[in-house]
Image (spheres, rainbow, N blue to C red):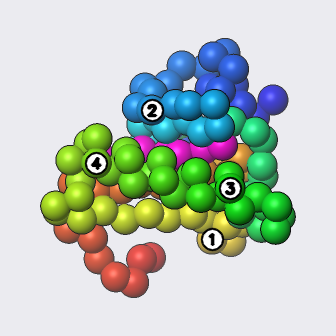
Amino acid sequence: MCVFCKIVSGEAAARIVFQDEDVLAFHDVNPQAPTHVLVIPRRHVVSLADTEDGDTELLGKLMQCARRVAEMLDLVKSGYRVVINNGAGAGQSVFHLHVHVIGGRRMRWPPG
Ligand code: AMP
């Protein structure tokens, strides 16, 4: 079972920010900014590239959860970044789809 599935099942600990029947949001264990939260589907999906046309609702829920997390953690006024790393070449290291919500510091562009 992948590490994020273990968080979903409760087998692994996480600092959960929000959860409902489809998605889960928790603090990243190795934060890249003062606030760094991951939003994941409860269902195991490897990556964005592994989603299908029928996953529109799930993808929408991930984005709605990212927005909600940003509101809950007071990132809206200062701005925040939403990132999906797709594939090892783009920096994906956990192969369970996740959306990074990063904020609390000035962001640079382009990302490294
Ligand atoms: P990515 O590199 O886009 O696949 O992002 C994976 C993220 O998961 C990294 O930022 C890791 O710090 C984070 N991570 C890995 N294991 C855990 C864990 N058990 N709890 C919280 N975050 C984790």
- Is 111 left, or right, of 80 in this rendering? right
Prevalent SS, magenta region: strand
Q: CA distance from mark 3 to mark 2?
A: 18 Å
- Please identify, in this view, whether the residue under mark 3 or under mark 1 is nearer the observer: 3
In the rendered view, does 19 fall on the left or right side of 89? left
Q: Earlier in the sequence, mark 1 or mark 2?
A: 2
Q: Is residue 97 visible?
A: yes
Q: Quadrant of residue 87?
A: bottom right
Q: Element under label 1? A: helix
Closer mark to the observer between disc 1 and disc 4: 4
Mark 1, Cα crowd under 10 Å, few <14 / some 14-19 / many 20+, is: few
65 to 55, vertically: above or below = above
In the picture of the structure, the residue carrying the numbered disc 1 is: 90
Residue flagged by tag 2: what amino acid is it? Answer: Phe
Q: Quadrant of the C terminus?
A: bottom left
Which residue bears the numbered disc 3?
A: 57
Q: Looking at the picture, how far across and down is residue 76, in whole percent? A: 23, 58
Q: Residue furthest left?
A: 77
- Mark 2 lies on residue: 18
Looking at this rendering, what residue extends furthest in the bottom direction? Answer: 110
Residue 16 point in image, percent of width and height: 45, 27
Image point (49%, 38%), residue name: 25
Q: Residues within 10 Å of mark 2 (few under 14, many from 20)?
A: some
Which of marks 4 and 1 precedes in the sequence?
4
Which of discs 3 and 2 lies nearer the camera? The answer is 3
Residue placed at 60% from the left, 64% from the top? 85
**N-terminal of the two: label 3 or label 2?**
2
Numbered badge on residue 71: 4
Mark 2, secondary structure of its residue: strand
- Residue bounds of the magenta highlight: 33-41
